[in-house]
Amino acid sequence: MKKILIIQNKRIGDVLISSVIANNYKAKYPDCIIHLMAYDFTHGVIQNNPNIDKIISINEKELKKISNLLRIISAVRKEQYDIIFDPYSKLQSRLICKFGDAKQTVGHKSRKKIGNLGYYTHPVGILESKTHICGKAIEDRIHLLKQVDTFEDINFEPKIFLTAEEMQFRVPQKYQDKKIIMLGVLGSQPQKSMPYEYVAQIVDFIAETFDCYLLFNYAPNQKEEADKIYNLCQNKSNIILDVYAPSIRDFAVLMNQCAVLVSNEGGTVHIAKALNKPTFTIFSPYINKDDWSSFEDGKFHKSVHLLDFLPNAISELTYEQNKEIEKNPRAMYMKLTPEMIIPELDSFLKEHLK
């Protein structure tokens, strides 16, 4: 009976899509033990997953302290894992792999071409391009999985496993007479948030065109920014303000009651997809759409990116130039106007709000 550790010290969407490693390994070896190490604020997307036997909580800031990292490495050594998967390959997780005493360690080679430095027994190159509708981010994780064994029937789709009680949740009675659109009005980071004035124009279009409720979603620390968007909106009558999901798990439960998600790209999009809800995603210009546009068929899951409309807006960039756009993408974001987005959004919503 093998014992597996998956380390995913990154954000919510990354943790959710890394669970496909656990899902597929457990499907082939039901008796194996799988632990997943993740930041404390991400646990909501992997709770109740029957393929994960234990969630190991780590704190993002605390992990960067040498004393805490050494303590975690010691704990990992005591567990005597057979395999450690490291999908994100940050310095801290690489050190855990190098000194964690597992029989096999699998992770990505450094993008900076400094060599493997003995972090992994199985160093793997990141795929150059996607070959599957699941998107390259998921493919990269399945590629890691295939380094240690043969898996013939791969399930590429991450899943959120709600409890029976969570499935029974209902929004207040006064909001049950119309369909609800969940709106991800802000990205997980400022760089993933489209200009507020554009968001307000899109919200106004939806409110004026479709007879439905609009539910703003944002992180607790983003309320002030969400209020700025709300105040820019001209049509506020059907915007729900008294229903809110304070945690990522609460969001999943609430999203399960909504008809569709319209959102900036981020973890909430992956959650909606894992709940089999239709999604319309607006990508930041600095994001490589092929990496994260999972299961995009243009109908059930649809997305827009600046390059879809202006293919030459961003030329081949150096790593440094791309980082500059990432720091301040507004100039590029302003080129992706509501006039471009709304016709695509209109056809999507007409299909899914019948």
Image: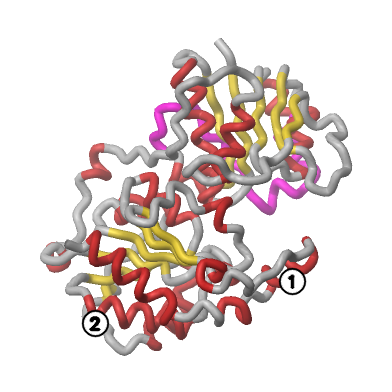
The kind of residue on which mark 1 rests is Glu
Q: Position of residue 292 (x, y in %)?
A: 54, 52
Q: How is the image coloured?
A: secondary structure
Q: Nearer the viewer, residue 246 or 217?
A: 217
Q: Position of residue 259 (x, y in %)?
A: 25, 58
Q: Residue 49 in magenta?
A: yes
Q: Which residue is mark 2?
A: 208
Q: Which residue is mark 1?
A: 324
Residue extending farthest to the top is 1
In the image, what residue type sits under mark 2?
Glu
Q: Residues within 10 Å of mark 2 (few under 14, many from 20)?
A: some
Front in this rendered view, residue 109 or 152: 152
Asked if 29 appears above or below 243 in the picture, the reply is: above
Q: Residue 338 in the image: state x and y as whole percent.
A: 43, 80
Give the magenta part as a residue range. Answer: 47-73
Precedes in sequence: disc 1 or disc 2 = 2
Q: Is residue 221 visible?
A: no
Q: Residue at x 50, y 58 (%)?
A: 266
Q: Is residue 164 visible?
A: yes
- The span from disc 1 to disc 2 (Cα, nearest Å) is 37 Å
| Quadrant that contains the N terminus | top right
Percent x, y for residue 87?
A: 64, 38
Image quarter where the C terminus lies is bottom left
Q: Quadrant of residue 210?
A: bottom left
Q: How many marks do you count on the picture?
A: 2
Where residue 192 sits, quadrant-wise, is: bottom right
